[in-house]
């Protein structure tokens, strides 16, 4: 099962705000032995959002969508999800109950605009929001969360702990790397291919750094049972090529 993320908002695309959701999704999944397979950024373009969701609804990935589920004119995600699925937007009774409870003591009360935040594609279920009780929603393996981190991140953790606990394996992933000096990345390509061929339980990565010192972080990530032998393969191969290396540490 693959996990993906869609992060929506003109403020991200324009640079007015820096995205933090992807890093948090990676960390939250990683704590549970899971990985983020992909991430896509979208502006507040209804046609583009709809086309993207139409495609991802047709796939098998579990998708976390951040942003655009409010009730302001630039919040399109709820209506785009309904349009992509070919269903109507409907006020969800559980969402209505949460919103009414949230604003019961508010001087303005429960307005149509506030209730609109509980209108989800027909067939959705709600995702509870511990911050202010305005829920997100889930529909076709997609989990739609607010753009505000203080709301979205606890909701992300709740979704994983409630629906995907059977997949948790905190010891599933291991990582180890070495720092290689004096080599160009192209000079290590054949070694990386050999390592992948002989150690199918890992992925090999190469991260060149130019400043303040030039070197390559060469490493492996994957099943802990295969990481130790795979990184040893790289150590020996780098030495055989005549380059120096030091351990970068393990995680």
Image (cartoon, helix red, strand yellow):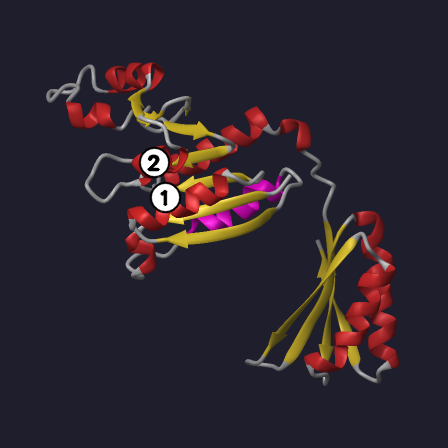
28 falls in the magenta region: yes
Residue 244 appears left or right of 169: right
Q: What residue is pinned by disc 2?
A: 83
Label 1: which secondary element: helix
Taking the spot 55% from the left edge, 47% from the top edge, the residue there is 26
Position of residue 185 relative to residue 114, above or below, is: below
Q: Quadrant of residue 133?
A: top left
Residue 14 appears left or right of 227: left
Earlier in the chain: of badge 1 and badge 2, it is 1
Label 2: which secondary element: helix
Question: Could you say which is closer to the camera, residue 198 or residue 251?
Answer: 198
Q: What range is drawn magenta here? A: 20-31
Query: Furthest residue to the front?
Result: 86
Q: Position of residue 104 (x, y in %)?
A: 20, 15
Q: Position of residue 204 (x, y in %)?
A: 73, 63
Crowding at mark 2 (Cα within 10 Å: few <14, some 14-19, many 20+): many
Q: What residue is pinned by disc 1?
A: 50
The main secondary structure of the magenta stretch is helix
Question: Could you say which is closer to the camera, residue 105 or residue 241?
Answer: 241
Q: Position of residue 132 (x, y in %)?
A: 31, 27
Check if mark 1's residue and mark 2's residue have beta carbons within 8 Å: yes
How far apart marks 1 and 2 lie (CA) works out to: 7 Å
Taking the spot 17% from the left edge, 28% from the top edge, the residue there is 113
Taking the spot 71% from the left edge, 36% from the top edge, the residue there is 169
Taking the spot 64% from the left edge, 41% from the top edge, the residue there is 34
């Amino acid at each position: 099962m693959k996990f993906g993320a869609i992060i929506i908002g003109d403020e991200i695309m324009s640079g007015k705000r820096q995205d933090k959701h992807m890093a948090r999704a990676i960390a939250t999944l990683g704590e549970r032995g899971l990985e983020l397979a992909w991430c896509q950024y979208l502006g507040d373009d209804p046609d583009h959002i709809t086309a993207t969701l139409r495609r991802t609804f047709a796939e098998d990935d579990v998708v976390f969508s951040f942003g655009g589920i409010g009730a302001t004119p630039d919040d399109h995600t709820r209506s785009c999800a309904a349009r992509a699925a070919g269903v109507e937007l409907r006020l969800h009774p559980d969402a209505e109950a949460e919103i009414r409870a949230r604003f019961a003591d508010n001087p303005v009360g429960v307005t149509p605009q506030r209730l609109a935040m509980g209108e989800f594609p027909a067939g959705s279920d709600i995702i509870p929001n511990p911050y202010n009780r305005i829920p997100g929603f889930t529909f076709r393996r997609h989990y739609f969360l607010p753009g505000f981190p203080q709301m979205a991140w606890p909701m992300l953790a709740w979704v994983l702990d409630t629906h995907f606990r059977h997949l948790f394996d905190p010891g599933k992933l291991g990582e180890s790397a070495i720092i290689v000096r004096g080599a160009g990345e192209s000079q290590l390509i054949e070694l990386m291919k050999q390592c992948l061929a002989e150690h199918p339980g890992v992925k090999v990565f190469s991260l060149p750094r130019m400043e303040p010192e030039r070197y390559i972080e060469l490493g492996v990530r994957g099943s802990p049972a295969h990481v130790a032998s795979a990184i040893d393969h790289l150590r020996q191969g780098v030495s055989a090529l005549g380059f120096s290396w030091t351990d970068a540490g393990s995680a």
